[in-house]
Amino acid sequence: MASIARLPMPLMEAYEWQYEGACREADPETFFSPESERGPRRHAREHLAKTYCARCSVRDQCLQHALKVKEPYGVWGGLTTGERAALVTGERSAG
């Protein structure tokens, strides 16, 4: 579960970047895995999600948000849950 204590205050300015996301054109299911999804099907869906992220003007804000709130699901800022976890682990061992 995401840590809601880390979420910004419920101010429009804190979330305004989301209105610029390329993902607004996509089915939200593209970014979130069904519980039973595995293997090639999951890889294909994540690849499709990342194609939206690759052309997104707010990709950095999205990723920073996901890292800040420790978002446990989905593709955010072009990274999967596992990729974000590896990034955080790498930051911890480097710092």
Image (tube, rainbow, N blue to C red):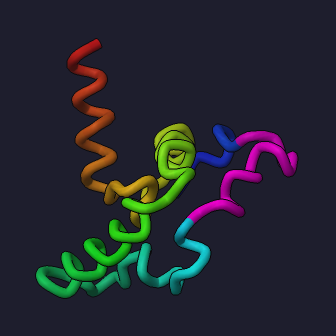
Q: Residue at 23% across / 80% down in the picture?
A: 42
Residue 88 drawn above or below residue 70: above
Q: Is residue 34 left or right of residue 37?
A: right
Q: Name which quarter of the figure residue 92 lies in.
A: top left
Image coordinates of residue 69 in percent, x first then y, are 56, 44
Q: Is residue 52 left or right of residue 42?
A: right
Magenta segment main secondary structure: helix
Q: Is residue 46 left or right of residue 3?
A: left
Query: Which is nearer the eye, 43 or 36?
Result: 43
Residue most toward the right?
A: 11
Q: Name which quarter of the figure residue 54 lies in.
A: bottom left
Q: Residue at 23% across / 41% down in the picture?
A: 86
Magenta highlight on residue 10 = yes
Residue most toward the left?
A: 39
Q: Residue at 22% across / 81% down in the picture?
A: 44
Q: Which residues are magenta?
A: 8-21
Image coordinates of residue 77 in percent, x first then y, are 44, 53
Magenta highlight on residue 81 = no
Q: Residue at 87% across / 46% down in the picture?
A: 11
Q: Is residue 51 left or right of residue 11?
A: left
Residue 76 drawn above or below residue 41: above
Query: Which is nearer the eye, 24 or 8?
Result: 24
Residue 93 drawn above or below residue 76: above
For the C terminus, the image quarter is: top left
